[in-house]
Image (cartoon, rainbow, N blue to C red):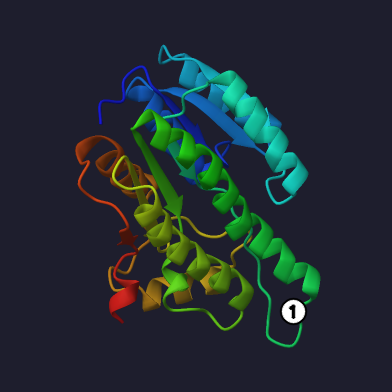
Amino acid sequence: MEIQGKTALVTGSAKRIGRAIALALAAEGMNLILHYRRSRREAEETQDAAERLGIRARLLQADLGKYSELQRFLRQAFHASPKIHVLIHNVSVFYKTPLGKVREKDWDSFFDTNLKAPFFLSQAIGLAMFRQKEGKIIHLIDWTAFRPYTNYLPYCASKAGLAALTRGLAKALAPYVQVNGIAPGPILPAVGSTREEIRKVLKRTPLARFGDPSDIVETVRFLVKSTDFVTGAVLPVDGGNLIV
């Protein structure tokens, strides 16, 4: 798909991988709708960096885990750009939930943000893409959707659901919209990781190192710009974790 001058919506775009994806798309000439939840200062920095590349970038705030805010966000997004050509769903909730200590509000938090939100965003934006006969949707999933951690079961289950949703949407929105997922492994240390936790991650990863946001960016670039013949795929970018 030719993307220059078109519009991409990136959720969770203020920091880390979301920011890297947004700036890479801006460098390709795409206008942006940048979502953030709490990190306004970082989101404004991303917006400024993107606009210095010569594109238009609009900031929109919402807690996408709350359905009323998600609906408001969609109205604002379509007002900002009636045609959205690329949706990158990056935002997610992630924290430890050992078995026996999982509360209902934990379960709801993971599924509302990590599965319910991407479904309703993809439904609304995907159907609009279908009507315009062009569009790309990419969900950031996680390699643990397929090899779950026992101390993160609600998170892993929500991401497994997102993998299934990705494949189902690819069928429902064909032939005009390509829907794919990326399953990152250890790209950046989790916020608050200890040295021992980082050591364990490196020990179990076949490539014995963390990846870089650029590894995800290049996969996004491939799916958005370089091919229109991949849909329903979940591409692992995980340092080999799925083979051990």
In x, y percent, where is residue 69?
74, 40
In x, y percent, where is residue 53?
40, 16
Picture layout, residue 11 above or below residue 56? below
Pointer 1 residue = 102
- Residue at 54%, 68% (x, y): give it: 195
Left or right position of 7 against 193: left
Residue 62 seen in the current view: no
Q: Secondary structure at mark 1?
A: loop
Front residue of 154 and 54: 154
Residue 103 seen in the current view: yes
Left or right position of 131 against 95: left
Name the quadrant containing residue 158: bottom right
Number of residue marks: 1
Mark 1 neighbour class, 10 Å CA radius: few under 14, some 14 to 19, many 20 or more: some
Picture layout, residue 138 above or below residue 10? below
- Residue at 29%, 74% (x, y): give it: 206
- Residue at 68%, 82% (x, y): give it: 98
In x, y percent, where is residue 212?
37, 50
Instruction: Determine the residue located farthest toward the bottom in the rendered image.
Output: 100
Picture layout, residue 158 above or below residue 235? below
In x, y percent, where is residue 214?
34, 44
